[in-house]
Image (spheres, helix red, strand yellow):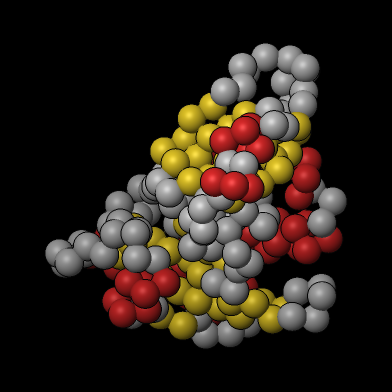
Amino acid sequence: MPKEALPLGWRQAALRLEAGLRERAGQAPERLDATTIGSDYPTRDWIAAGWRISVAFSDGVTRRVDLLAGAHFPTTPVRTALVDHPVAMTWPHVEGDGILCLLPNMAEWDPDDPSAVALGLLHRSISLIEELLEGSIIERDFREEFVTYWGYKVHSKGEALFSLVAPAPPSRQVQVWRGKGLELVGGSGVARRLDPPSLRRQDSGQDRGGGLPLA
């Protein structure tokens, strides 16, 4: 979290955003302190401030949603996060700490009206969460961004990944053999050949992977 004092323009934009949140959400947003930000988003040192609101969803569960601003706000838009998120890789577009991926890297926004942009992102976040709760987009979106999510998954523990599979058609099922500090992707027999019962170690294992959509 940035430690330097934030400029007057930043603070004015933040106050307008907070007022807009209060009016739109019908509740006083909770200002996040440095301890909460550091605990909930330990790898996001760009976060300068945050606001938390509670949202009642269609499944009857009330979940908390954060709006997070960096030191370059309002030149850069806020990010949103689902505080009460499922474990990583359960839902697409939801990172491991609950940050939601809504805007593409080259997206355009209006820096002169940051409150409207932030409230628009909040509305999109709530709509996305409702779609994820309904469930129909989950498999589709994982498939459409297969390479991205595969990368997140295999590198989540910092282990080395090697592949024996050529990235070419047809689509097929693969297996992942996991040893200590090493993961190996191969065909259906890779785990059996590398880890026969007579040599099986406690720290190894295997997972049957999904189909590779290469056709």
Screen quadrant of the C terminus = top right
Q: Position of residue 122 (x, y in %)?
A: 60, 62
The answer to whether residue 75 shows anywhere in this view is yes
- Which residue is at 76% across, 49% downward? 138
Relative depth, front residue between 165 and 18: 165
Identify whether 52 is placed above or below 4: below
Screen quadrant of the N terminus = bottom left
- Which residue is at 69% across, 31% downward? 189
Q: Position of residue 36 (x, y in %)?
A: 37, 78
Q: Residue at the left extreme?
A: 4
Identify whether 4 is placed above or below 181: below
Relative depth, front residue between 10 and 59: 59
Q: Is residue 191 left or right of residue 4?
A: right
- Which residue is at 77% across, 23% downward? 171
Q: Is residue 4 left or right of residue 191?
A: left
Identify whether 19 is placed above or below 150: below
Q: Quadrant of residue 54?
A: bottom right
Q: How many marks?
A: 0
The answer to whether residue 145 shows anywhere in this view is no
Relative depth, front residue between 84 and 143: 143
Q: Is residue 3 left or right of residue 32?
A: left
Q: Quadrant of residue 50?
A: bottom left
- Which residue is at 43% across, 49% downward? 180
Q: Position of residue 83 (x, y in %)?
A: 54, 72
Q: Quadrant of residue 193?
A: top right
Q: Position of residue 8 (x, y in %)?
A: 23, 64
